[in-house]
């Protein structure tokens, strides 16, 4: 959509001439150009007091579409903050270059530049390619191809026409880090902004595992020169709709093909070093801490865990959005039961769990944010490993059943067997497990999430007993 008609005259397209927003120099490279990055890290960078020094070059994941659309309007876009009381609009200009992720030449050039200080990641939990126990998995989808491509690149000599290059975001990052090593540009920070516990350490393992394909020289250089920063990120950002695009045109008087809609709430907690510097994100509201684990777990278990419950239980009960599912007493009860379990294992100063839970209820209940359950339901085997398993393990170690976490797993097992189009890195294994029956099927599906819980007969029996219960469940209504 390049123009929106107003009467007979097309509206001007949002671009830097229209908004007179100067470009900052590229000092941040981002992998995973999508709506969440544009509502979160790009927002914090724009609102940092030194934003004029910190431009972002953002690379897409699988397709170039988002980069093409942003480039056509000078990389500007509108952020729509949507609250129960109405919408507000802000033009974001911190992204100064949008690039097809397949353009490894440009990625290598930017990462190798001395001015580049930070690489941020929003590549989804599944893209790290780790095994269920958190170790590097050389056989994960795409990883083996990356290792071969990196080994070929490390051998030197001219690249043959059509020779493979890394296809995953982290494989491409390793190629770019090799270019930085060769350029002598010095250290930088890699900042994971994906919903994984200890995501900085996860990123380090995933990068170092792939770097082995290049060889010891790169592994040693990364170990000495690249810091891996852990973060906890939070801002509900649903997919943009045609109605959102039309609203921006009507309210703002220009055509924007790529607006982003988000809730007013935002949170960013970071822990780690930045050897080449960073924007003053803390002046925009980010929090810098020494120990991020309590904040990670609070967000992963309470927010993301309840999202998983709502995604699977809600769809089984015929709901489409988070707000709709939360209004269902059966779903609300399942969420509250899981929260009670998780809260027992959330320790740390300043977490204020009761207030956090109430804030989540308020945020989830904002019906003007149409957060689609189908969007949340993808990549379950990776997500449940971080959301359900730690709570269940802690509860059972304390002598309790872990039934709240077990219901999350049971709801997913029911959902996975319902003939839905499964979006998951282990989709083929899920389909194979679904061919089994009874307890064998439950155990096979649980094994894709965690071998430890699949090998616990008590867990398998508990989850098996809860399968089929969500769709028929009733509960006494609880007011929001």
Image: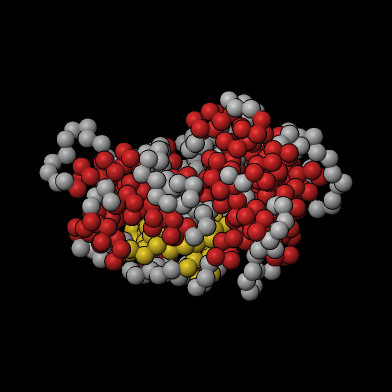
Q: Is any atom of residue 430 visible in this view?
A: yes
Residue farthest to the right, as pictured: 476
Q: Residue at x 44, y 60 (%)?
A: 200
User: Can you give x and y, in whole percent of width and height, for residue 74 in the image?
Assistant: 40, 48
User: Can you give x and y, in whole percent of width and height, for residue 63 in the image?
Assistant: 40, 37
Q: Looking at the picture, does residue 267 appear above or below residue 65?
A: below
Side (left or right) of 436 relative to 213: right
Q: Is any atom of residue 17 visible in this view?
A: no
Between 463 and 468, which is closer to the camera in this rendering? 463
Q: Looking at the picture, does residue 277 appear above or below residue 63?
A: below
User: Can you give x and y, in whole percent of width and height, for residue 221 in the image?
Assistant: 25, 62
Q: Residue at x 25, y 66 (%)?
A: 186
Side (left or right) of 460 relative to 205: right
Q: Residue at x 62, y 50 (%)?
A: 388
Between 24 and 60, which is closer to the camera in this rendering? 60
Between 479 and 11, which is closer to the camera in this rendering? 479
Q: Quadrant of residue 469?
A: top right
Residue farthest to the left, as pictured: 157
Q: Quadrant of residue 303?
A: bottom right
Q: Residue at x 43, y 60 (%)?
A: 201
Q: Looking at the picture, does residue 36 appear above or below residue 311?
A: below
């Amino acid at each position: 959509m390049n123009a929106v008609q107003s009467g007979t005259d097309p509206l001007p397209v949002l671009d830097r001439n229209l908004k007179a927003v100067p470009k900052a120099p590229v000092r941040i490279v981002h992998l995973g150009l999508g709506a969440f990055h544009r509502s979160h890290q790009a927002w914090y960078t724009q609102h940092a007091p030194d934003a004029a020094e910190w431009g972002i070059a953002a690379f897409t994941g699988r397709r170039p579409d988002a980069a093409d659309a942003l480039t056509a309007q000078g990389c500007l876009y509108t952020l729509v903050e949507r609250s129960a009381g109405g919408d507000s609009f802000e033009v974001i200009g911190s992204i100064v270059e949008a690039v097809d992720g397949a353009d490894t030449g440009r990625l290598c050039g930017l990462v190798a530049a001395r001015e580049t200080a930070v690489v941020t990641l929003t590549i989804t939990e599944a893209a790290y390619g780790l095994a269920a126990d958190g170790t590097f998995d050389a056989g994960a989808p795409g990883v083996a191809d990356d290792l071969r491509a990196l080994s070929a690149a490390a051998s030197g000599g001219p690249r043959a026409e059509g020779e493979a290059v890394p296809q995953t975001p982290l494989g491409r990052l390793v190629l770019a880090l090799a270019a930085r090593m060769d350029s002598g540009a010095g250290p930088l920070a890699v900042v994971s902004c994906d919903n994984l516990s200890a995501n900085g350490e996860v990123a380090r393992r995933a990068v170092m595992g792939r770097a082995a394909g290049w060889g010891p020289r790169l592994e040693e250089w990364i170990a000495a020169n690249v810091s891996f920063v852990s973060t906890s990120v939070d801002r509900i950002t649903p997919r943009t709709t045609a109605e959102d695009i039309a609203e921006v045109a009507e309210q703002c008087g220009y055509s924007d093909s790529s607006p982003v809609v988000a809730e007013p709430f935002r949170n960013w907690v970071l822990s780690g070093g930045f050897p080449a510097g960073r924007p003053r994100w803390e002046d925009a509201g980010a929090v810098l801490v020494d120990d991020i684990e309590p904040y990670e777990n609070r967000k992963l278990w309470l927010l993301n865990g309840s999202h998983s419950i709502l995604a699977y239980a809600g769809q089984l009960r015929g709901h489409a959005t988070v707000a709709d599912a939360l209004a269902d007493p059966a779903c609300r009860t399942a969420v509250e039961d899981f929260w009670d379990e998780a809260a027992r294992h959330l320790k740390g100063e300043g977490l204020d769990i009761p207030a956090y839970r109430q804030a989540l209820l308020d945020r989830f209940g904002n019906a003007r944010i149409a957060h689609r359950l189908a969007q949340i339901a993808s990549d379950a085997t990776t997500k449940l490993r971080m959301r359900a398993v730690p709570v269940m393990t802690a509860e059972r170690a304390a002598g309790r059943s872990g039934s709240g976490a077990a219901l999350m797993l049971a709801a997913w097992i029911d959902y996975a067997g319902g003939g839905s189009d499964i979006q998951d890195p282990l989709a083929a294994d899920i389909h194979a497990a679904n061919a089994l029956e009874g307890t064998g099927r439950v155990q096979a599906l649980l094994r894709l999430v965690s071998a430890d819980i699949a090998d616990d007969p008590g867990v398998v029996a508990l989850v098996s007993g809860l399968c089929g219960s969500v769709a028929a469940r009733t509960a006494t209504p609880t007011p929001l």
